[in-house]
Amino acid sequence: MDESELEAFCRREYPRLVGALSLYIGDQAVAEEIAQDTLARICADWPSVRTKRSSGAWTHRVAMNLAKSHLRRGRIGARVTAQAVARQPHAHHDPDSADRLSVRQALVALSERQRAVIVCRYYLQMSVTETATAVRVPEGTVKSDTSRALAQLRAQLDFVDDSEGVQP
Amino acid sequence: MIDQLTERLSDAAPLPSAPLPYASIRQKGRRRRRRRLAAKSLLLLAAIALPVGLVRAFPPTSEVAFQPTVQEAVGLFELPAIGEAAANEVGGDIPSRARLALEKEGVRHYVWTDASGVFCMAVVMAQNSSTNCMSLPGTEMRYSSQAGGWSARIVPDGYTRAALADGREVDIVNNILAYATTPDPPPGGPETSTPAQAEPVLQGPAGELQLLDDVSQISEAMFAVLESAVKTPLETPRGRLRPLTNQLTTVPLPGLDSQSRGVVVDQGPRGSFLLVPASPSEGRLCLVWVSPSQDDGSYSCQTQELTLYWPLLTSITWLSEAGIGWAAAVPDGWKEVVLADGETIPVQQNLIVIDDLTDAPSTALLRHEDGSTVAFAIAAADPVTPDPRGELTESPALDPATYSVLDQPVTDDPRFDRYRADPTHPEVNLSVPRLASDQEGTVAFVTPSVAADDGICVVVINDGSVRNDACFGRAEDASEPLADLSVSDEFTVAVVPDGWTRAELPMGSVVDITGNVLIMPTEIIRQGSGFVEGPAGRLPFDLTAVLD
């Protein structure tokens, strides 16, 4: 086994995993825990994973599965979501934190599946097909969820009108 | 808006609070792989101890670079298991672990391995089905009905087409060669009722292989070590060993006893290996491993007629401190194994030993003195998260988790009424309790969760009081029975999938798992480690860290 290849892969994917999972779950500590668990699984299966067409996509799919399991099992779901919503901007001091929090709060207000779709599509920049695979829903559902979620986000977040069409 | 959203999401996504603790992740990964491999040892054995497992044979002159992948070597068993629902729908004796290998002309072919690692195939037609188990690929399974005859065989990897004696050419799909034995007459041609006299010739990357009608034509494998060494009495732990297909109990070796004599082909810190002719009249040979401490051992036996397709005559695995050991007996002439990562392991005294499969490549090449090579799988594929739906998915190596307690009738046990009157967990479905277990004054009820997911809840009542109630998500597969726990001062409870029947707790305590519920006294499991076991395997556990 090429240990350096595996280590490089883990170090490269870790920040994106943490970012995506934080946006999806709403709790960075839990996100880091799940990201590390994901990578431990990847390490365990590396001979198989490295032969896949997209090891990265596979890894994010595993991460989403684990995150959904955590949410489903109710260990963190409602409690963490409530905590995320309850956080106030004034607790942070850097000038951009208000916008970050408003983005996170807008995400939390989406349904779980819509949130997963948005994170995959626009944070991880996956295609519709990749998103459907990662979230385990049909492509049509990805498109409809994207459309509804974008409408909701547009209502909650200020966007500069760049006249760009939305193509879920 | 999309560009802005992407940018704002990137901005809102936090960076990790600390660098990746790679060393600990790697160690965790190794532990996980070891645990899963241990849990899968039975399945693993089906893949590696099969008398003829899914061999990819290369022409003797082939010197092409050896770059096998997991997918290449495991062949048919890469397919997903059909699962419980489909097995019930098909009916008959088809187990949920069966694979639907081929559906052709309205005939479905299901394949699985039985408890001895022997191939079984069910041929299912519209109204009828026929099941047969065979120890040898290429053995024909004929099936006749009013609609005509049908022939189906499992053949080794490496062959893509078959030329039948009647001139037809048939594609081989998922290791299955299947065809009507009464072919349709050619348009305008004369009617024929002559069954195809087909002993097909297989063709493919592996070359050509003439299937044989009479397996007795296959020459017996020779083991020089059996002739050259002095045979010694078989000394086994208390005369009993674990057959590989049953890790849970020790049983007498069939056809062997302490009077049997075998050849010690290797002896050292990793234990002793013996080759024992078990039943000379049947040409059976057993490979036996006995642990260094003489208190454990396992064995596997096969007939010596199988080398046409599979030179690894018989193989065994065992668990030790070093990991998951693997050994195989090979006939004379095979000289070395080349692992996919380039490591070469010589065959010594007709024996190949790999001390630890945990991080070993999944495929290897067995090289003969004459230059011929055969590739084989030494470990089953180990998918990360089994999911039969997605295109990225590889087949799950384990059957999906099932919970048969939910198939039991709803109970009207009055002991649940008190909980029903004053429930303490909002997800417990109060209207459909099942009685999971009732032992020594402790009763457990299981219900589906009323939450939107498909969770399972358990309520434990002891002496009329609720001692624990909790809801769990279902396991993704049966490999991690203790993935989720509910801990109370008195009882630690887990809902475990089918296939786990018993737990050995610290301090010599043993509890049965009934109704998919494992109830463990919390004080006892604080004391150390234990094992959970059943037909699904045997797994060590240590919950002390969780409880602390």
Image (cartoon, coloured by chain):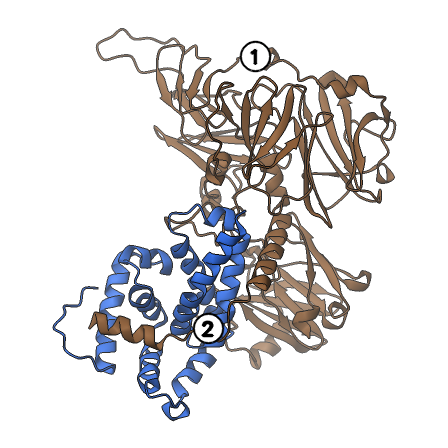
Chain colours: A blue, B brown
Residue holding disc 1: B214
Query: Is residue B548 in sight in this rendering?
Result: yes
Disc 1 to disc 2: CB gap under 8 Å? no
Q: Of discs 1 and 2, which sits in the foreground?
A: 2
* Residue type at numbered disc 2: Pro
Residue holding disc 2: B16
Q: Where is residue A111 in the image (x, y as percent from the top left)?
A: 34, 73
Q: Which residue is drawn at 49% across and 69% down?
A: A70
Q: Is residue B386 above or below residue B196?
A: below
State the SS at label 1: loop
* Residue type at numbered disc 1: Asp
For this orientation, the residue located farthest to the top is B190
Horizontal side, residue B219 vs residue A151: left or right:
right
Q: Mark 2 lies on which chain?
A: B
**A151 or A119: nearer the viewer:** A119
Q: Residue at x 43, y 68 (%)?
A: A15
